[in-house]
Image (spheres, helix red, strand yellow):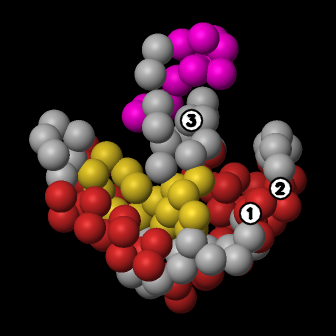
Amino acid sequence: MSDFIYDWVVRICKPAFQVSSSPVVLHRERLNQPGAYILAPTHTSAYDVPCLMKESPRRLDFVSITELYRKPLVAAFFNSVNVFPLDRSRPDSPTVRKILQRLRDGRAVVMFPEGRIRKPVESVLNGGDV
């Protein structure tokens, strides 16, 4: 886990996302809540992660899928910005322990409960399957 690299990425990329995106953020004030919490947003765009990083005043730790870790450079980058993998093909106790430890440390953990990027019409918000 590297808060330094996370902060650097946010600082470098934030201006680009400020001029190129206007995300809808409901209950923005909750992002600055002290202490641990789990954030479970929808996942309707590949830009959800950078937009969350841009909008949150706190550092976020992201749970990702192991499939994205197959490429060594992607895995190295993800590891450097507080992302860690979850193996959805089996019970993944080590990742559950990592989530619990991060919560004990007072961190904000982001999980996308829909499990993948979905078209807005397929999202659970619009009646899609979980």
Q: Are marks 2 and 1 in contact (CB under 8 Å)?
A: yes
Position of the C terminus, as image quadrant, is top left
Q: Are marks 3 and 2 in contact (CB under 8 Å)?
A: no
Q: Earlier in the sequence, mark 3 or mark 1?
A: 1
Left or right: residue 123 compared with residue 89: right
Relative image position of residue 121 (x, y in whole percent) = 63, 12
Q: Is residue 129 left or right of residue 29?
A: left
Q: Nearer the viewer, residue 101 or 76?
A: 101
Report the span colored magenta: 115-128
Res. 9 image quadrant: bottom right
65 falls in the magenta region: no
Nearest the viewer among 3 and 130 is 130
Q: Is residue 72 visible?
A: no
Residue at point 65%, 21% (across, down)? 125
Q: Is residue 127 magenta?
A: yes
Mark 3 vs mark 2: in front: 2
Seen at 19% across and 64% down, the residue is 94
| Mark carried by residue 42 | none
Q: Under tag 1, what secondary structure? A: helix
Q: Where is residue 51? Give x, y as percent.
A: 69, 53
Q: Amino acid at mark 3?
A: His
129 sits left or right of 48 in the view: left
Look at the picture and state if 71 lies above or below 42: below
Residue bearing mark 2 = 28
Amino acid found under the numbered disc labelled 2:
Arg
As measured in the structure, the alpha-carbon distance from the residue carrying label 2 to the one carrying label 1 is: 6 Å
Type of amino acid under label 1: Leu
Label 3 sits on a secondary structure element that is: loop
Identify the residue at horizontal 50%, vertical 63% (top origin). 109
Q: Which residue is mark 3?
A: 43
For label 1, the residue is 31
Sequence-earlier tag: 3 or 2: 2
